[in-house]
Image (cartoon, helix red, strand yellow):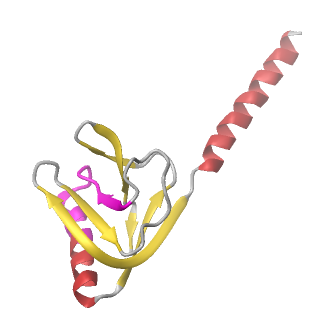
Amino acid sequence: MFKIKSILLCLMTLIFTSSAWAKEYWIDTSGKVFQIATYATTETILVYLDTSGSDVAECSDKQAFAISNTLSSEARSRMYSMLLAAKTAGTPVTVSYTNVGSCEVWGTNNSAYRRIMRLM
């Protein structure tokens, strides 16, 4: 009896763990940079494209993407430079983010904006 319970417990753990991993995936959204907003109080950069992209259920804002304040200042500067160049030239960019677990904190809201994981 103990063996059967142990095997069932292992199988259930494996199923739940693998299904949690299977649900996370990257989303790419391409569009022209419509607006860039910077905030000194949070050191977060918000990016608005002419397309809103896919919703992330955990994130409350469905329009903006965020360059996280947790990135190094060098990484934020590189992304910011890419966005400014794309906006000036009118060329599209691709922002990548995940569908779960990557919302950017904004003030007291722990799940505000879709956090940019990659910028092309």
Q: Position of residue 55 (x, y in %)?
A: 49, 57
Task: Left or right? Give the position of 115 relative to 83.
Answer: right
| Residue 9 or residue 25, whichever sits in front | 25
Question: Residue drawn 31% across and 68% down?
Answer: 48
Tell me if residue 15 comes above or below residue 74 in the rendering.
Answer: above
| Residue 94 or residue 32, whichever sits in front | 32
Q: Position of residue 3 (x, y in %)?
A: 86, 15
Tell me if residue 63 comes above or below residue 23 in the rendering.
Answer: below
Question: Residue drawn 22% across and 40% down?
Answer: 107
Task: Left or right? Give the position of 15 relative to 48.
Answer: right
11 in the magenta segment: no
**Count of numbered badges drawn on the protein:** 0
| Residue 103 or residue 12, whichever sits in front | 103
Question: Residue drawn 89% across and 9% down?
Answer: 1
Quarter of the image for the C terminus: give it: bottom left
Farthest residue, direction top: 1
**Residue 91, image quadrant:** bottom left
Region of the chain picked out in magenta, as a range? 63-79
Q: Position of residue 116 (x, y in %)?
A: 37, 60
**Residue 12, image quadrant:** top right
Q: Position of residue 6 (x, y in %)?
A: 79, 18
Farthest residue, direction bottom: 89
